[in-house]
Amino acid sequence: MILWSFSRRYPWFASLTNSTLQKLGADPKIIEVPSKTTLLREGDPGEHFYVVLEGQVEAVKRMGTEEEQFLSVRGPGEFISEISLLHRDVKRTASIVAREKSQLLELTRDDFDTLLTHEPMMAYEMVRALTLSLNASNERHISD
């Protein structure tokens, strides 16, 4: 359970009970992503959900094409790939590239379902954060 001690630093995880953390397992999967590494590709199926623990990653639409568009930067405590887990038939909506060396918590679809089943208030937090992100994205598009 020592590895889950980081959870108290991030608002979305701060409210998790020890019982829920035990259901998720004693050893969460933490991955290191080198700078400039593409972690996820737009259009791929989404089976994992990530939380940025350290570093920064950026979301990019149509990566590598003339229509490439930068969407956002995600940093410590923010989620990546939550949409593909909320909508099971939806493919990844953007590519994710590490801006710098980053450390991410990787959760499976089952881990994600466990979180939302045992911590329903987390779903409200997620909806709130998604709404803020959508509003910010709309504002960027309107100003462009």
Image: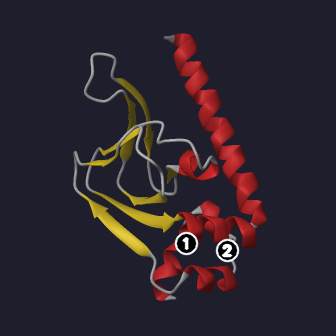
Where is residue 22 shown, x and y percent of the image? 60, 86
Residue positioned 46% across, 56% down in the render: 76
Q: Note whether 13 is above or below 124 in the view shown.
A: below
Q: Give the camera-side residue of 76 and 23.
A: 23
SS class of the residue under badge 1? helix
Toward which corner of the image does residue 65 lie, by quadrant?
Answer: top left
Say which amino acid is labelled 1: Ser
Q: Note whether 136 is above or below 10 in the view shown.
A: above
Location of mark 2 (residue) = 16
Say which amino acid is labelled 2: Leu
Mark 1 Cα within 10 Å, few/some/many (few <14, many 20+)?
some
First in sequence: mark 2 vs mark 1: 1
Q: Give the camera-side residue of 9 and 138.
A: 138
Residue positioned 48% across, 57% down in the render: 47
Where is residue 75 shown, x and y percent of the image? 44, 50
SS class of the residue under badge 2? loop
| Distance from Cα at disc 2 to Cα at disc 1 | 8 Å
Location of mark 1 (residue) = 7
Marking on residue 28: none
Determine whether, in the image, residue 120 is placed left or right of residue 134: right
Residue positioned 71% across, 53% down in the render: 125
Tally the marks. 2
